Each structure stands twice: as structure tokens, then as C-alpha cells.
Amino acid sequence: MARFDTYLDDRLAQGCAYFSREEVLTSLGLSPAALGAALARQAKKGRIAIPKHGFYLILRPEDRGLGVPDPARWIDPLMRYLKLDYRIGLLRAAAFHGSSHQAAMVFQVIVPRQLRAFEIGRHRLEYIFQGQMAFEQVNQTQYLGQLKTDAGYAKVSGIELTLFDCARYFHRAAGINGLAQIAKDLGGMADPSKLAQVAEHYENSSVRRLGYLLESMGHALQADALRPFVRKAKSAVLLEPAVKPLSPELPGVREPQPAWGLVVNELVEVDS
């Protein structure tokens, strides 16, 4: 269908490598059946990709090697289509801020709703759920940054928020060693007052875990900003809850860390 090809070319010329079902129906006046057939033809030709039903990506020749463009180029319009606030987080955010040790194998997005991860082309997009109240309190301009691409801007966790998200969801951020590396790489750039503000909205165990690692990595000023939260702790927690054995007399478990209310049951290793 020549009209549909022209529509795709015009969208690209306007700098919009995406469109919604509603937009194309309005623009071209197609019936739903005709649109469905046109979309199927374009997908078969490798001209479009579908990350979400009703939302489509227009592929340039250079995009087709990876199946679709980098998700940073289309995550913002996708989330606007879903009418859902978001932020790019965890490993991708850490890499954005300069933690170059973190090779982000997935594109992780933090949202206040349960959504399924999906793969498209050679990319995997993973949604990390954060409760609505906490999400709204921290997903604020003062705690966020902007990731610029040739297609526009996308919301990304600021340094302090990246540190806390990685502490809260560290099993999805390369484990305790990955968290330690991020604390080492980014901790010195964190604003202590912002750390203390953001900490109010995270589990106390996550705050203590991050504080201990910041101190261990030599970022005393940032660690001190989190020390008051230790007084709120009711009991010691494990640095790495997934590691067994847990009995103090068995190998691999050390004495509790009274300064942070942690049992350091895992040796932390980072790159120099």
C-alpha cells in the first residue's frame, strides 16, 4: 500500500520513528481490517516492529541488525502511549552515570505497575515494579536525569536514586558485587542530602546495605548521611540474604556489623 509507505517515510522525516494505531487510523482513514493487513505486510518486510499492541516502531535500515533501535530511543513515547510514568534504572542508569563496569544486558525500567518483561529484536526490556506511593515520592525532577538520544530525551534515575534502586533490587543489578561496584563508581558523586531524602522512601535494610558499601568503598561523607537510619533498625539483616549457610559457626559468615546492623555473610569483590 503506497499510502502506508509514504506515511512511514513522512513520520521518519519528522523525526518520529514510531506511531500508534489510533494515529495511523486517523491519518489515513483506513478500516481496522485494512490497517491490520498493512501492518502485517510491513512487519514481514522488516519495516516495523511491535513492542506493544497498538504501538509500532518504524525501522531504518541501520536498525535491523539488532531488530529494533536502542530502547532509549523509544521508551519515552511508549510509556506516554501507556499513560504511565517511568524511569530508566538499575544497570542502564548506572552505566549512564559512569559505572562503566556495568554491561547492561537488559534495559530496565522502573514503573508503578506490574508489567511483563519482553524481548524484541536482540533487546530485552524488563520492568521493575515499585509501589505507587514510593514511586510518586521519588520519581521527581530533582532526583531524575535525562538520557539524550537522537530521538529526544528519556527519564533516567539520578545518581542517588540509581544507588538506592540498585540497593533495593540488587539481585537484578548484578548481585551484591554489582551493587558494590556501583557504590564504588558512583558513590563519591552522590549528594549526601539527596541520599538522606531518598532513603526515607526505601526499606531500612536497603539503606543499611548501601551505607555499609559506601563506607567500605571509601565514600565516608555519603555513608554518614545514611547512618541515622541504623537507629531505626529492629534487628540485624544479612548483607546477602540468598547466601547459605546462615549459621554463625559455619564458614562464610562473619560477626555482625554493629555500625550498620548487618551480618556480612559474603565477601564483596570489586574491580580496581
Image (tube, helix red, strand yellow):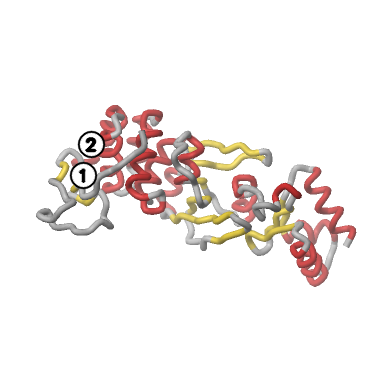
In the rendered image, the vertical position of residue 113 relative to residue 98, given as above or below: below
User: Quarter-wise, where is residue 211 in the image?
Assistant: top left
The quarter of the rendered structure image containing the N terminus is bottom right
Residue at the far left: name it: 249
**Of 266 and 85, which appears nearest the observer?**
266
Residue located 39% across and 40% down the image: 163
Relative to the observer, which residue lies in front, 172 or 155? 172
Q: Point out the residue furthest to the bottom here.
A: 33
Task: Name the residue beneath numbered marker 2.
Answer: 228
- Label 1's element? helix
The answer to whether 92 appears left or right of 253 in the picture is right
Residue under label 1: 232
Disc on res. 36 = none
Amino acid type for the residue under numbered disc 2: Pro
- The part of the image, by quadrant, that contains residue 67 is bottom right
**Which of the image's four quarters has the C terminus?**
top left
- The CA span between labels 1 and 2 is 8 Å
**Image point (76%, 57%), residue name:** 47
**For the point 70% across and 53% down, which residue is it?**
64
Residue 214: x and y, percent?
Answer: 30, 35
Number of residues whose C-alpha sits closer than 10 Å to that of mark 2, classed few (under 14), some (14–19) or many (20 or more): few
Q: Is residue 262 left or right of residue 24?
A: left
Q: Could you tell me how many numbered marks the image carries?
A: 2
Looking at the image, residue 96 lies above or below residue 57: above
Question: Measured from the top left, where is residue 59 in percent x and y?
Answer: 73, 52
The amino acid type, in three-letter code, at marker 1 is Lys
Q: Position of residue 152 (x, y in %)?
A: 66, 39
Query: Badges 1 and 2: C-beta atoms under 8 Å apart?
Result: yes
Q: Secondary structure under badge 2?
A: helix
Image location (x, y in percent) of residue 179: 36, 44
Does residue 116 lie above or below 96 as drawn?
below
Confirm whether residue 235 shows in the render.
no
